[in-house]
Image: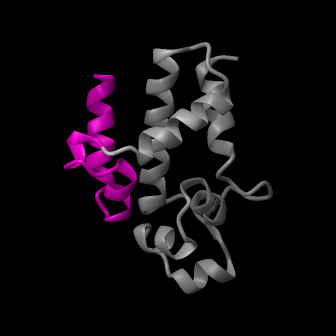
Amino acid sequence: MNSTAKEIQVLENFFDTNSPKVNLKILADFFGKSDADIAIALDLDPSAVSRNPLATPDGKVKTWLSIFNLIIEIISEADPSLSAEQIKSKMQKWLVLPRPEFDSQTPLEYMLKGKSRKVKMFLEQQLG
């Protein structure tokens, strides 16, 4: 399986199976956060998300997906033999470990505080 197929396989986990929308409940579960935390970070109404967890991939949702894509690409380039599940696990681990580049906070904490663009720029620099 090539890296693009693996990227798609990892990212599909976050999408609703019946629509092109991101399932925020799945995203919240993946990070061990509440739906409300994810909704607020993505500038969405938490009460609306609790009624309908599907979000159109635009705005901050799109930035988060770009971040996931970049992480997957970096991991895949470092070790092309990894399965999609292994990549997903490494991505999750990278996002929740404190990093000096983010003032010893985790990339996820940065993202939850609305600093997704800084995380994205850091990853883009890593790809060179």
The foreground one among 105 and 21 is 105
Q: Residue at x 59, y 37 (%)?
A: 88
Image quadrant where residue 21 sits: bottom right
Q: Position of residue 2 (x, y in %)?
A: 64, 17
Q: Position of residue 87 (x, y in %)?
A: 58, 30
* Residue at the extreme right: 18
Q: Residue at x 50, y 48 (%)?
A: 65
**Residue 40 higher or lower than 80, as above or below:** below
Q: Residue at x 78, y 54 (%)?
A: 17
Residue 64 lies within the magenta run = no
Q: Quadrant of the C terminus?
A: top left
Q: Is residue 34 left or right of residue 102?
A: right
Q: Position of residue 125 (x, y in %)?
A: 26, 30
Q: Quadrant of the N terminus?
A: top right
Which residue range is magenta in the image? 99-128
Q: Is residue 78 left or right of residue 118?
A: right
**Residue 102 higher or lower than 113, as above or below:** above
Q: Is residue 57 left or right of residue 119?
A: right
Q: Position of residue 54 (x, y in %)?
A: 65, 68
Image quadrant where residue 123 sits: top left
What secondary structure is the stretch in magenta mostly built from? helix
Q: Residue at x 38, y 63 (%)?
A: 112
